[in-house]
Image (cartoon, rainbow, N blue to C red):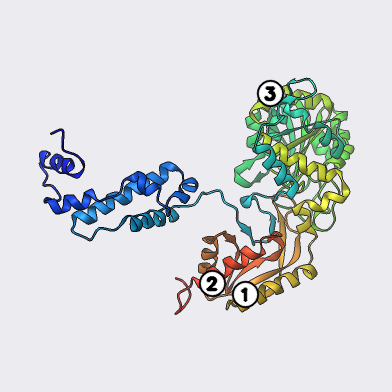
């Protein structure tokens, strides 16, 4: 019947398919006719502000589900809820929706370059540069002087040459991509000599032997796990050898009875044999450092020692975003840039923007303190204790038990394994630290803390400037979330 609409039509359809209609009678039909439409609920004052954050499709799905549930209630004879109550139900359902999985967190672990948390935080200048480039169009591949297409690899070439001292340099997506590109472009079908102590696996299952296999080069072992001398490289060299590859040890260390040739010694042997020396410097360090980073070799030092190409990561000790830096001989860099794989591994405009801003800070000694990584590295217990004491006073005033304690921070990020930095932590005593840590992870914003046998610890070193207020609010909220008769279970 053409005039049948809404719930009446649905009921007739149920009867036609052999099922009894859920409801009958004019009262139920009248109640269902009083339901607001989906558009009206979307436009309600309690719902409309949430649509932009959750998306039209998600908001509409929640509205429809809420209306379907309300129909079920009314069919069952329950009292109709007014439109305002339905709108509140929609708003609550949207608020309970799982948040985006890529979110900012507060790092309370004390690991400065925490790979799982995105490694180096960007400087204010780098954040501004990324926002500026992201918000509009840019010269990523446009030459303003000539008014035509340009090359993204020329954008930072001069800056990279300046800070590394290299003849030429280029940027790819990350450090692993840089190693893969160099091996593929320069060593495919030939042999690469690697110390047995450097045929390593780093985070995420990245293994040097497998990278060599992907590049089409063949791995030749030299020396032993703990001791490799330059003569071991010489003996492993043959007519098919293309290069010696020196690999950064990343996140492990061998100590005791060890030997490893210096870059200068290895470069002399490689060049005498007519092969290349490729150095994976890993951490992307630009200037010599002291303390736990004292043994890290800066990229410029490896180049001065004779390496043909040096590779480093942008988001480690350089303090920029993810990027792979390749610096060295101009003819070799040009060969890499021409290789088809270079396009697949190229950086995007946001990576270039963050790297450019960070390199500009490195170029100017007075601005190097702008890089958050280096500010955190320079913090001492004497500067951290007053900060933690302020936190303790604030929390105690809010009724939350807290104290300060000495602890150890780590550089992290596959830079220098082992050595630590003395630090100070905020400690939150609790009989169930796992439960408190879980509540901190579920907070707004999430706080990634350390679980100890009788407390949760938050290392003050890695809590960034400007995060104190939200950190303390998150701690108070998580501490008060425990049941009044005992800790959360």
Label 3 CA crowd tier, 10 Å (few <14, some 14–19, many 20+): some
**C-alpha separation, residue under disc 3 versus residue under disc 1:** 63 Å
Image coordinates of residue 29 in percent, x first then y, are 17, 49
Mark 1 or mark 2: whose residue is earlier in sequence: 1
Label 1 CA crowd tier, 10 Å (few <14, some 14–19, many 20+): many
**C-alpha separation, residue under disc 1 versus residue under disc 2:** 10 Å
Label 2 CA crowd tier, 10 Å (few <14, some 14–19, many 20+): many
The residue that label 1 is drawn on is 395
Q: Is residue 439 above or below residue 9?
A: below
The residue that label 2 is drawn on is 479
Image coordinates of residue 479 in percent, x first then y, are 54, 72
Checking the image for residue 189, the label placed there is 3
Position of residue 310 in the picture relative to residue 426 (left or right): right
Looking at the rendered structure, the secondary structure element under dot 2 is helix
Numbered label tally: 3
Mark 2 or mark 3: whose residue is earlier in sequence: 3
Image quarter hosting the C terminus: bottom left
Q: Nearer the viewer, residue 467 or 202?
A: 467
- Residue 360: quarter of image: top right
Q: Is residue 371 above or below residue 381?
A: above
Position of residue 14 in the picture relative to residue 186 (left or right): left
Position of residue 489 in the picture relative to residue 418 (left or right): left
Image quarter hosting the N terminus: top left
- Residue 389: quarter of image: bottom right
Q: Nearer the viewer, residue 278 or 314?
A: 314
Q: Are marks 3 and 1 in contact (CB under 8 Å)?
A: no
Mark 3 or mark 1: whose residue is earlier in sequence: 3
């Amino acid at each position: 019947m053409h005039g049948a609409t809404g719930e009446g039509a649905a009921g007739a359809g149920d009867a036609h398919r052999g099922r009894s209609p859920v409801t009958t009678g004019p009262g139920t039909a009248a109640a269902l006719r009083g339901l607001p439409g989906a558009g009206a609920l979307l436009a309600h004052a309690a719902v409309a502000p949430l649509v932009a954050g959750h998306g039209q499709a998600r908001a509409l799905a929640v509205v429809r589900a809420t209306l379907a549930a309300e129909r079920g209630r009314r069919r069952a004879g329950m009292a109709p809820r007014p439109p305002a109550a339905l709108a509140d139900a929609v708003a609550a359902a949207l608020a309970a929706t799982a948040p985006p999985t890529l979110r900012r967190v507060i790092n309370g672990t004390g690991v400065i370059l925490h790979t799982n948390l995105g490694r180096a935080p960007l400087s204010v200048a780098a954040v501004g540069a990324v926002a500026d480039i992201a918000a509009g169009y840019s010269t990523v591949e446009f030459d303003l002087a000539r008014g035509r297409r340009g090359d993204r690899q020329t954008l930072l070439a001069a800056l990279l040459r300046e800070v590394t001292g290299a003849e030429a340099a280029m940027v790819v997506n990350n450090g692993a991509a840089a190693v893969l590109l160099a091996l593929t472009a320069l060593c495919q079908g030939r042999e690469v000599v690697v110390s047995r102590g450097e045929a390593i696996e780093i985070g995420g299952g990245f293994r040097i032997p497998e990278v060599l296999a992907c590049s089409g080069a063949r791995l030749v072992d030299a020396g032993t796990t703990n001791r490799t001398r330059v003569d071991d490289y010489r003996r492993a060299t043959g007519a098919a050898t293309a290069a010696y590859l020196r690999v950064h040890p990343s996140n492990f260390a061998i100590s005791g009875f060890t030997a490893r040739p210096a870059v200068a010694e290895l470069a002399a042997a490689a060049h005498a044999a007519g092969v290349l020396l490729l150095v994976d410097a890993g951490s992307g360090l630009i200037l010599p450092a002291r303390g736990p980073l004292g043994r890290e070799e800066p990229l410029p030092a490896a180049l001065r020692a004779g390496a043909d190409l040096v590779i480093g990561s942008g988001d480690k000790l350089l303090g920029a975003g993810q990027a792979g830096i390749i610096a060295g001989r101009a003819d070799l860099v040009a060969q890499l840039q021409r290789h088809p794989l270079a396009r697949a591994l190229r950086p995007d405009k946001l990576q270039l923007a963050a790297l450019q801003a960070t390199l500009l800070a490195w170029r100017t000694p007075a601005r190097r303190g702008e890089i958050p990584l280096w500010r955190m590295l320079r913090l001492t217990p004497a500067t951290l204790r007053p900060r933690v004491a302020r936190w303790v006073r604030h929390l105690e005033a809010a009724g939350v038990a807290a104290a300060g304690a000495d602890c150890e921070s780590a550089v992290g990020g596959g830079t220098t394994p082992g050595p630590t930095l003395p630090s100070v932590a905020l400690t939150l005593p609790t009989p169930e630290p796992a439960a408190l840590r879980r509540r901190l992870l579920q907070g707004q914003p999430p706080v990634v803390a350390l679980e100890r046998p009788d407390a949760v610890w938050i290392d003050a070193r890695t809590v960034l400037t400007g995060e104190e207020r939200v950190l303390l609010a998150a701690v108070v909220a998580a501490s008060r979330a425990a049941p009044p008769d005992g800790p959360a279970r």
